[in-house]
Amino acid sequence: DTFNAALLYNRAVAHGRTGTLQDAIHDCCSALDLNPSYTRALLQRARAYSELKEHWEAVADLERALEVEPGQKDVARVQQHLTAARAKLEAEGDDHYAVLGVLPDAEEAAVRKAYKRLALLHHPDKAVGGG
C-alpha cells in the first residue's frame, strides 16, 4: 500500500503542475486512504486546496500534517503555509459562504448541511468546561 500511495502522490504532483487541481486532490485522497499518515500527500492536497481558494480544507490538511508528523524536517515551512492559509481564511471572513466552507454556487442543501454542522460544533451546550 505504501508503494501505491507513493505512485498516487507522484501523479498528484504532476496534476498540480499541469493545473488539474481537482485530479490532484483526488489522487491525494486516494493516497491518504492507503496511508493516512502520508504527510507529503497531505501537504500536496493542501497546496491544491489553497490554489482553488478552499482555505478551510488547506488549513485542515496543514494542521493534520503537523499532528501526524510533528518532528518533520520542514515543520517551519509547514507552519508558515498554515499561517498564510489562516490569514487568507480570515480575509474571507465577511464572505458567509467561506465561513460555512462552501462555494457561493453551492446548492441550498449543502449550505444547510454546513450550517448545521458548524452550529452543532459551536453550540454552547457542547462547550467544554466553564459551566
Image (cartoon, grey):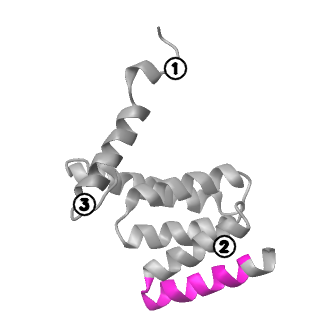
CA–CA distance in space, label 2 to label 3: 29 Å
* Label whose residue precedes the other's in the sequence (2 or 1): 2
Q: Which residue is the extreme one toward the top?
A: 131
Q: Amino acid at mark 2?
A: Ala
User: Callout 3: helix, strand or loop?
Assistant: loop
| Residue 111 horizontal/vertical position (percent) | 27, 51
Q: Which dot, 2 or 3, sits closer to the camera? A: 3
Q: Amino acid at mark 1?
A: Val
Q: Quadrant of residue 9?
A: bottom right
CA–CA distance in space, label 1 to label 3: 33 Å
Instruction: Work out whether residue 5 or residue 116 is closer to the camera in this orientation and state it.
Output: 116
Identify residue for label 2.
Answer: 31
* Label whose residue precedes the other's in the sequence (1 or 3): 3
* In this view, 114 is above or below 7: above
* In this view, 82 is above or below 31: above
Q: Is disc 2 in contact with disc 1, using a CB cutoff of under 8 Å?
A: no
| Residue 102 horizontal/vertical position (percent) | 31, 57
Magenta-colored stretch includes residue 11: yes
Identify residue for label 1.
Answer: 128
Q: Quadrant of residue 36?
A: bottom right
* In this view, 111 is above or below 127: below
Q: Which residues are magenta?
A: 5-20
Q: Which residue is the extreme one toward the front?
A: 109
Q: Amino acid at mark 3?
A: Glu
Dot 3 surroundings within 10 Å: few (below 14), some, or many (20 or more)? few
Q: Residue at x 49, y 83 (%)?
A: 16
Work out which quarter of the rendered image holds the N terminus and state it. Answer: bottom right
Q: Which dot, 1 or 3, sits closer to the camera? A: 3
